[in-house]
Image (cartoon, grey):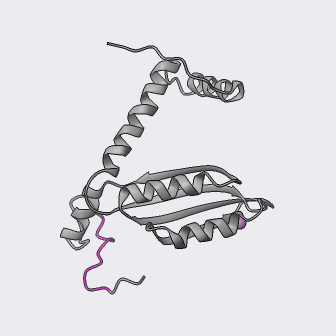
Amino acid sequence: MISRISIAIENDLLEDFDELLERQRLGNRSEAIRDLVRRRLIEDRIEHEDGEAVASLTLLFDHEQRDLSEHLVEAGHAHHARVLSTLHVHLDRRLCLEVQVLQGEPAELRQYADQVIGLRGVKHGELVLSSAGLWRGHEDDGGSTRSGGTGRHNHQGSEESS
Ligand code: NI
């Protein structure tokens, strides 16, 4: 059973979307939109697992946007999501690329990301959540080499810095 829906979308956005579908051979609009919805649903499933998750939040923003830097810092301090590390690159005179490594309850990471991405001056943002299950596995084996690992990733006996 299939439902037909109509959605409102800006002309520019639709043109760009069509061009992307054509270039990457992603099928028709319906297929592509279904894929996006499925991906979001999978993320939602990760978000509702028990326990903490880790994530990376990539942000592209205009640092000349009034008060944006202050708002970003405030959001990072005020939220339950913990910002473990931040990478900041000045792309040009105005644009900054920032990647934040986060840890916390998945729903809180999502909430934090939505808040930050929604700030005026943030041009693009994307949260990539790692499954809570993967994270728990990492705790259990103490981070030692796993099958297929290179052996480079062994934290045993080392002090974790924060
Ligand atoms: Ni910058």
Q: Nearer the viewer, residue 158 or 63?
A: 63
Asked whether, in this view, residue 57 is left or right of residue 50, the answer is: right
* Residue at image coords 36%, 55%: 130
Q: Position of residue 35 (x, y in %)?
A: 43, 29
Looking at the rendering, the quadrant in which ligand 1 lies is bottom right
- Location of the C terminus by quadrant is bottom left
Q: Position of residue 85 (x, y in %)?
A: 50, 72
Position above or below: 9 against 114: above
Q: Would you say residue 106 sits in the magenta stretch?
A: no
Quarter-of-image position of residue 51 = bottom left
Q: Nearer the viewer, residue 86 or 154?
A: 86
Asked whether, in this view, residue 52 is left or right of residue 58, the answer is: left
- Location of the N terminus by quadrant is top left
Position above or below: 81 against 113: below
Q: Nearer the viewer, residue 96 or 79?
A: 79
Q: Which residues are magenta?
A: 150-158
* Residue at image coords 26%, 86%: 157
Q: Would you say residue 157 sits in the magenta stretch?
A: yes
* Dominant secondary structure of the residues highlighted in magenta in the image: loop
